[in-house]
Image (cartoon, grey):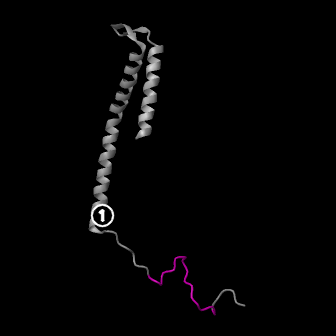
Amino acid sequence: MQVIIIILLILAILLVIFTLQNSIGISITVFFWEITDAPLVLVLLVCIVSGYLLSTIYLLPKIWKLKKEKSQLLKKTESIQKNDTFQTIPESSDDDYEGMELDDDDNNSFFKD
């Protein structure tokens, strides 16, 4: 928490320095609307904040969709665990996983010594 406060203080100091060094007024024309003598810092801050807001608005549907998927998956896993539908397949000792049966009887072996 203290690190965040220190970082915010450093950023605030840098913003004040930037404001003092760039206190010129600029004119902005958007379509038929014109703003004269707007401070450069104010224009930059408005652009940064509006970009952040637009990107957040753009990502909200994706975030809502992911939250909905997460809740559906959690409900599904809870119902599976509740119903205990996991069934274990009993292992039989007669099954040979390699496709051929291996006995202890070596009399009928292919390789005879």
Amino acid marked by disc 1: Ile
Is 85 situated above or below 3? below
Pick whichever, 48 or 104, lies toward us.
48
Q: Residue at x 34, y 39 (%)?
A: 62
Pick whichever, 96 or 48, lies toward us.
48
Pick whichever, 67 or 97, lies toward us.
67
Pick whichever, 24 or 79, lies toward us.
24
Does the magenta run of residues contain 8? no
Identify the image quadrant of residue 103: bottom right
Residue 26: x and y, percent?
42, 8
Q: Residue at x 40, y 41 (%)?
A: 1
Residue 96: x and y, percent?
51, 80
Is 74 situated above or below 51? below
Q: Residue at x 47, y 19 (%)?
A: 17
Residue on which disc 1 sits:
80
Q: Which residues are magenta?
A: 92-107
Does the magenta run of residues contain 95? yes
Identify the image quadrant of residue 13: top left
Is 86 situated above or below 14? below
Residue 14: x and y, percent?
47, 24
Answer with left or right where residue 3 lies relative to residue 30.
right
